[in-house]
Image (cartoon, rainbow, N blue to C red):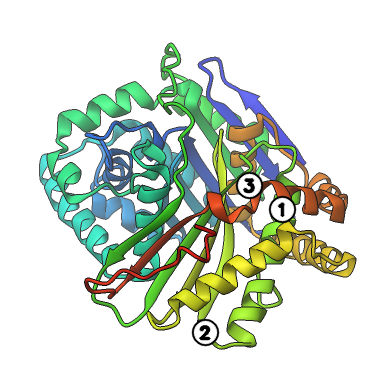
Amino acid sequence: MFNKTVLANGIRVVSREMPGTRSVTLGIWVENGSRHESRRQNGISHFIEHLFFKGTEQRSAARIAEEMDSVGGVLNAFTAKEYTCYYAKVLDENLPLAVDLLCDIFLHSVFDPEEIERERQVILQEISQTEDTPDDYVHDLFSLDFFADHPLGRPICGDPETVNALHREDFLAFVRDRYLPGRVIVSAAGNLKHEYLTEEIARRLGSIERAAQLRDGEGAVPQLQNGIFQHAKKLEQAHLCFGLASVNQSDPRRYVAYVLNTLLGGGMSSRLFQEIREKRGRVYSVYSFLSSYRDIGYLGIYAGTSVEWSEEVVELVIAEIKKLAAGEIRDDEIERTRNQLVGNIILGLESSDSWMRDIAKDEIFFGRAISLDDVIRDIRAVTRDAVVELAASTLRPEAMALTLLADIGKKKLDFGSSFGV
C-alpha cells in the first residue's frame, strides 16, 4: 500500500498506489515553514511559495497556468508553521506533466524583480483581507498572545513591515540555505506506479547536491502565556479564542487528545455546540480544535458572540472545561465520539489529495507511513479513563489564554472571576 525510497542525495519519495482512482496528486514538501524564520524574515517562506509560480527559465507564469488548465488539473501550494508544500492534482495520464511542472518551478524559478514587486502587493492585500476577516484575524492575534515572541506565534504571511523589507537576495539566500535535499519529501497518491515516480524524480531532482543539514532553527520550546488579552476593533461581533497546552504531534496520547477535542467542540453534537449554541443561542459559531507541532501543541476554542454576551460565553466555555476536567464523561459519549472520529477520518481520506498530504505529514513527524487500520485501531482503543486523565491534567482554566477581538471601546471586559482570579 505504501512505498518509500530515499534518493542518494537524501530526498525522500513516498507514495500510496490507489489503482481504483483516475487521479494522481503529487506534492513536493519542504520541512521549512514560518517557524524557521527570524523576526526580520517573518513571511519569507510564504512569499517564496508565491514566487515559485511566477516564472521559470523555461516557462512564464502564464504558461505555467495554461499548461495545468489545459488538462483540467489543479496547481497550488500552501505554507504552514513547519512545512511548505507545492502540489498538483491531475488525471493519471497527466502525471508526467505534473512531475515536469513541479520540478521546473522547484528548481528553476527565476524570482524576477518585477514579479516580486507585483506579488508583494498581492501578499499585502492578503494580509489586509485577513485583518478584515475577524474570525480569522483573532487566531493570528491569539498566536501572538499565546506564544509571545516565539516564531510559532508570528503570522505565516508576515506583516506589512517585514514583507516590504524582503528583497530578491533574501529569497535566493533562504532557498539556498533552507531548501536542502535532506528536508525535501516528494509525496504522491493515486493511480501511479512508485517505480516510475521514483525514476522521474531521481532524474530531475537527484542532481541536487547533498548538503550538510542546517540546524532546524526552531528555537527553544515556546513558553506559553496565560491570561486575558483584549484587542479593540470596530466590529459587530465579539470574537473569542481560548488556548490550553496539549500534546505535540508525536505524543502517544494524541488519539486520546483527538477524542477529548471532538467531545468538547468537534461537531454539532459536541458539548460546546449543544450547550452554548443550541440550548442558549448565545453564539452562531463555537468549536474546538487541536494545533500540534513537533515539540508542543494546544487545544483551542473559538466562539463568535456579541460584546453583551461575551462574559457569559466565557463562563459557559469554562464551565464545560471544568466538567470534563472533573471526569464528568459518560461511556456512551466516548463510544459515540470514537465512531465520529473514525467516520470523519475514513471519509476524509477518499481522495488522492488527502492521502498525498497524509503520508507526507507521517513522513515528516514519524519517518514512516501510518496505515488507516492502525489509526482506527488506536482510536478504538481510547478509553474513558485515558480521556479523563488527559482532561484533568490539561484542562486547567488558570493556565488558559483568552484573546478577545471586539469593539470594547475604552472599557475592557472583566473575565477575572471566570478564570478563578
Residue 28 image position (x, y, % from top left): 48, 38
In front here: 108 or 358?
A: 358
Left or right for 336, reference 87: right
Residue denoted by label 1? 391
Quadrant of residue 187 in the image? top right
In front here: 230 or 193?
A: 230
Q: How many marks?
A: 3
- Disc sitting over residue 124 in the figure: none
In front: mark 3 or mark 1?
1
- Identified at 19% across, 45% down, the residue is 163
Quadrant of residue 321 in the image? bottom right
- Determine contact: label 3, label 2, CB under 8 Å: no
In space, the residues marked 3 and 1 are separated at their CA atoms by 27 Å
- Identified at 59% across, 41% down, the residue is 361
Please tell me whether residue 382 is drawn above or below residue 368 in the rendered image: below
Residue denoted by label 3? 358
Residue denoted by label 2? 282
SS state under label 3 = helix
In space, the residues marked 3 and 2 are separated at their CA atoms by 36 Å
Please tell me whether residue 181 is drawn above or below residue 159 in the rendered image: above
- Determine contact: label 3, label 1, CB under 8 Å: no
Left or right for 59, reference 401: left
Q: Judge the density around disc 2: few (<14), some (14-19), many (≥20) Cα neighbours within 10 Å.
A: many
Return the residue found at the far top. Answer: 212
Q: Earlier in the sequence, mark 3 or mark 1?
A: 3
In front: mark 3 or mark 2?
2
Q: Earlier in the sequence, mark 2 or mark 1?
A: 2
